Image (tube, grey):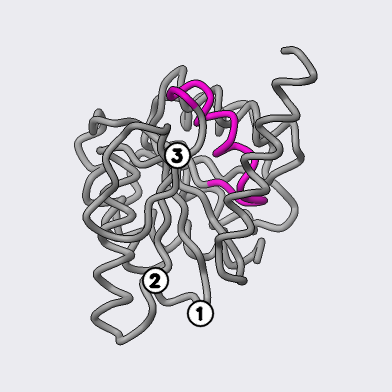
């Protein structure tokens, strides 16, 4: 990719970062449809648990499926607790803003938006996902971001989990739950919560 294009993506990411409040961030990536029969329930539970982390900012790619399920649950849980929602979506220019959280616009299409989204956090959570998610993970990883794959959900998260050694910051039990087919959505969400906390 041409250096001038990369610089533009960097600039766009910095512009959005300047609009975000201070606090730790986690970006949620994944499929726009639910392929695993428990992914929707898992995503809702993840959003509910992550909402309890003080000052956490949740960033999504502004699409349906995994991002929306986690995002809406996070938003709803924080509102119910009387806290600032702190949910932010990133979409290309020309798209419609979401009806919850704050929507920022960057890039001319989804490919450019993925490049920018991959620059907006040091911590990414992956549930399911396909080639587009793989692109976002590639961008994030090239910038030394930490990626937590929910391996049991399949898709790119499953592939990434299978080839990723357990990070030292995540204990063996937590890492095992993330990849175990027999883990329940609630167990998986608690493992995600512990993994996120270990990196904040």
Check the image and report above or below for 173 versus 37: below
Q: Which mark is residue 51?
A: 2
Could you say which is closer to the camera, residue 163 or residue 65? Answer: 65
Which residue is denoted by mark 3 in the rendering? Answer: 29
**SS under mark 1:** loop
Provide the residue designation for mark 1: 54
Magenta segment range?
A: 108-124
**Label 2 with label 3: CB-CB less than 8 Å:** no
The quadrant of the image that shows the N terminus is top right
Q: Secondary structure at mark 2?
A: loop
Residue located farthest toward the bottom when viewing the structure as drawn: 82
Q: Position of residue 9 (x, y in %)?
A: 65, 32
Q: Secondary structure at mark 3?
A: strand
Cα–Cα span, label 2 and label 1: 8 Å
Label pair 1/3, CB-CB below 8 angstroms = no
Apparent side of residue 133 relative to residue 98 in the rendered image (left or right): right
Dividing the picture into quadrants, the one containing residue 32 is top left
Q: Is residue 103 positioned above or below 81 on the image?
A: above
């Amino acid at each position: 990719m041409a250096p001038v294009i990369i610089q533009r993506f960097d600039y766009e990411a910095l512009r959005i970062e300047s609009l975000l409040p201070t606090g730790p961030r986690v970006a949620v990536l994944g499929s726009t449809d639910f392929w695993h029969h428990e992914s929707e329930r898992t995503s809702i539970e993840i959003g509910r648990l992550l909402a309890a982390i003080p000052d956490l900012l949740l960033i999504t790619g502004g699409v349906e499926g995994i991002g929306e399920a986690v995002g809406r649950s996070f938003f709803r849980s924080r509102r119910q607790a009387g806290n600032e929602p702190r949910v932010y979506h990133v979409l290309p220019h020309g798209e419609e803003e979401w009806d919850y959280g704050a929507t920022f616009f960057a890039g001319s299409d989804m490919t450019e938006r993925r490049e920018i989204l991959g620059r907006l956090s040091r911590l990414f959570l992956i549930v399911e996902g396909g080639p587009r998610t793989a692109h976002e993970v590639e961008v994030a990883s090239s910038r030394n971001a930490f990626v937590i794959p929910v391996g049991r959900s399949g898709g790119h998260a499953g592939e990434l989990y299978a080839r990723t050694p357990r990070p030292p910051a995540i204990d063996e039990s937590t890492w095992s739950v993330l990849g175990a087919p027999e883990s329940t959505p609630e167990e998986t969400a608690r493992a995600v919560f512990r993994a996120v906390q270990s990196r904040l």
